[in-house]
C-alpha cells in the first residue's frame, strides 16, 4: 500500500482509492482514523474528510459498531450498479445518435486500451476500459448525464478490482474495438452492440467472477 500520500484529504482519498483499484483492500476491511493518521502522517480531521469522500463515492461504507469498512460485492450490488449504468449509457448513446455525434473520442480511448499489454497493471487496464464508456456518454453532449456516469465510475471500477473479474487487456481491446466499429453504423446496431457489451461483458462477467471468488474458500477447505 502507498505510504505518505500527503496530509490533505484529497491525497489521502486518492491513495486509498488506488489501493481499492489495485485490489489491496478486501471486503470487510476496517479503516480506522488512528491507523490512517499514522500511515499518512496526517491529522484525524484530514483522515476523516478523506474517508467521507470515499463514502460519498460508494467506495467505502459506514457500518454500525464497525465504523468505516470496505463494502462487500454482492449479486444485488452488481445488479443495481449494472442496471443504473445501462440506463445512463444507453440513454446517452440515444442522445448522441439523435445528434449525429461522431465517436472519434471513443475510438481514441479504444486505441489507448489497445496499447495495454499483459504486463500493464490491472488498475490501469480497468481505468482505460472505463474511459471508453465515459467517452460514449460524453458524446451525448449532456453534462448532467456525464456527471452521473462519472459519479458511479469509481465504484464500478473498485468492484471490478475487488472481485478480479476475469479478463485481459487484449480481450477488452478486441471487444471494444468491435463495439466502436458497431457504433459507426448507428441506430439499433449501435444500441444493440452497447447493450450486449454492458450485459455480457459487464453484468454476466461480474456475476461469474463473484461466484468463482465465493467458491474459493470451499475449494481450499
Image (cartoon, helix red, strand yellow):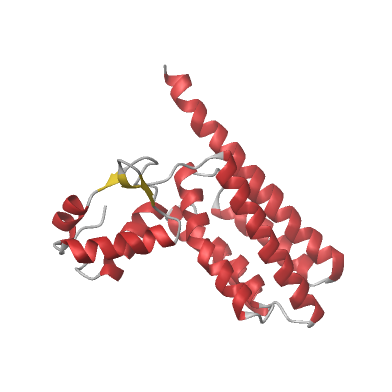
Identify the residue at image location x=59%, y=74%: 146
Identify the residue at image location x=42%, y=45%: 71
In this view, which residue lies farthest toward the top? 221
Q: Nearer the viewer, residue 59 or 6?
A: 59
The quadrant in which residue 180 appears is bottom right
Q: Nearer the viewer, residue 116 or 70?
A: 70
Which quarter of the rendered picture does the C terminus lie within? top left
User: How far from the left and from the top, in percent, is residue 79?
Assistant: 63, 46
Q: Nearer the viewer, residue 208 or 185?
A: 208
- In the rendered view, tell whether residue 74 sits above or below residue 83: above
In this orientation, does residue 56 appear? Answer: yes
In the image: residue 175, left or right of residue 68: right
In the image: residue 49, left or right of residue 184: left
Q: Nearer the viewer, residue 11 or 143?
A: 143
In the image: residue 144, left or right of residue 45: right
User: How far from the left and from the top, in percent, is residue 4?
Assistant: 18, 62
Amino acid at each position: 500500500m502507498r505510504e505518505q500520500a500527503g496530509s490533505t484529504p484529497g491525497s489521502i482519498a486518492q491513495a486509498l482509492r488506488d489501493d481499492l483499484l489495485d485490489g489491496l483492500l478486501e471486503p470487510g476491511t476496517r479503516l480506522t482514523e488512528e491507523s490512517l493518521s499514522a500511515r499518512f502522517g496526517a491529522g484525524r480531521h484530514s483522515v476523516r474528510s478523506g474517508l467521507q469522500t470515499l463514502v460519498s463515492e460508494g467506495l467505502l461504507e459506514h457500518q454500525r459498531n464497525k465504523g468505516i469498512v470496505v463494502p462487500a460485492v454482492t449479486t444485488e450490488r452488481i445488479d443495481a450498479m449494472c442496471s443504473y449504468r445501462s440506463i445512463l449509457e444507453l440513454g446517452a448513446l440515444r442522445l448522441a445518435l439523435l445528434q449525429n455525434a461522431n465517436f472519434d473520442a471513443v475510438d481514441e480511448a479504444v486505441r489507448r486500451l489497445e496499447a495495454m499489454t499483459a504486463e500493464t497493471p490491472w488498475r490501469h487496464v480497468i481505468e482505460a476500459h472505463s474511459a471508453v464508456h465515459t467517452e460514449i456518454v460524453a458524446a451525448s453532449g449532456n453534462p448532467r448525464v456525464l456527471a452521473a456516469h462519472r459519479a458511479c465510475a469509481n465504484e464500478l471500477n473498485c468492484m471490478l478490482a475487488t472481485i478480479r473479474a476475469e479478463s485481459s487487456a487484449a480481450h477488452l481491446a478486441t471487444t471494444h474495438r468491435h463495439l466502436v466499429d458497431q457504433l459507426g453504423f448507428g441506430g439499433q446496431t449501435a444500441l444493440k452492440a452497447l447493450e450486449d457489451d454492458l450485459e455480457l461483458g459487464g453484468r454476466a462477467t461480474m456475476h461469474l467472477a463473484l461466484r468463482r471468488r465465493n467458491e474459493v474458500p470451499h475449494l481450499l477447505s
